[in-house]
Image (cartoon, rainbow, N blue to C red):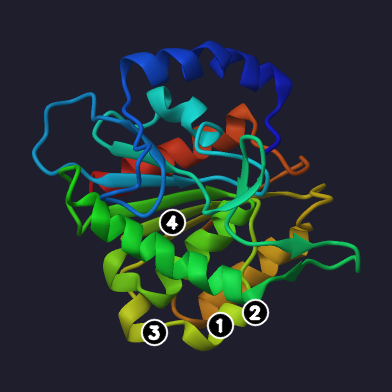
Amino acid sequence: MIIKKHFGICFSILILISIFSFTIMNSSKEKTTLHYLVRQPKTKITNPPLLLLLHGVGGNEQNLFSFANDLPDNFLVVSARGPLTLGPESFAWFQVNFTSGHPQINEQQAEAARVTILDFIESLKNDLDFDDKQVYLMGFSQGGIMSYSVALTEPEKIKGIAVMSGRLLPEVKPLIADEKRLEKLKVFVSHGRQDAVLHFPFATDAVSYLQTKGIKPEFHQYDEGHTINKQMFDDVNLWLKTNSAQ
């Protein structure tokens, strides 16, 4: 995951503070299917909305979690680690190859990851209290891909998704729910026009497809690459606050 340097520095200390002061880590996987970090809601609330953070290729559960302390106070924030180990502290949801100039995925792994995330959300109920009617996914890059795949196929289980620098897999389209089932799903999409990893047309193609399914995504574009900067974070944060208050 790439984060603008001037923005990332602001959160570098927060990662350590959050891990030791505000979170627990599931290290055994006995109750849940994935390792994860947690930020409890900052406000006292019964059955808070759940925000599940999904990292990109080569990242881990601490990447997006660096933002956790600045996410809306009412959310239970959970950051999950992808099931595929690429190296030390380096994980993914599925393998992808860019040598052809177009991302080629391991379709079996991508489908297994989709099912795993759904199972993980269900298993979290054993450990944490949250409103299962208010589950949001926020993913960067491959985490955004997984957000699309999970929500569009099982929209009854997901209230909204925030896809940052992601794409919609053509391989998942045959599994996508019909317009009636999708009508309540909230979608936020952000993408950099200079993205050299997942090119900008991936975002516009996804938005156009969503519109054919009756979804009206909130779409933000920036003169940026494959990254998250402060404006991107502020925009998604406002979207989360607005939709969770409805």
Q: Which mark is residue 173?
A: 1
Q: Which mark is residue 161?
A: 4
Asked whether residue 43 appears in the rendered view, the answer is: yes
> Marks 1 and 3: in contact by CB < 8 Å?
no
Measured in 3D between alpha carbons, the distance from the residue under mark 3 to the one under mark 2, in whole angstroms, is 17 Å
Q: Secondary structure at mark 2?
A: helix
> Marks 4 and 1: in contact by CB < 8 Å?
no
Measured in 3D between alpha carbons, the distance from the residue under mark 3 to the one under mark 1, in whole angstroms, is 13 Å
Answer left or right for 187 relative to 220.
Answer: left
Residue 173 percent across, percent down from the top left? 56, 83
First in sequence: mark 1 vs mark 4: 4
Give the residue pinned by disc 3.
179
Which amino acid, by three-letter code, is at mark 4? Ile
> Marks 4 and 3: in contact by CB < 8 Å?
no
Measured in 3D between alpha carbons, the distance from the residue under mark 1 to the one under mark 4, in whole angstroms, is 17 Å
Asked whether residue 217 appears in the rendered view, the answer is: no
> Which is more toward the observer, 222 or 108?
108
Task: Please tell me whether mark 4 or mark 2 is closer to you in this view.
Answer: 2
Q: Secondary structure at mark 3?
A: helix
Measured in 3D between alpha carbons, the distance from the residue under mark 4 to the one under mark 2, in whole angstroms, is 18 Å
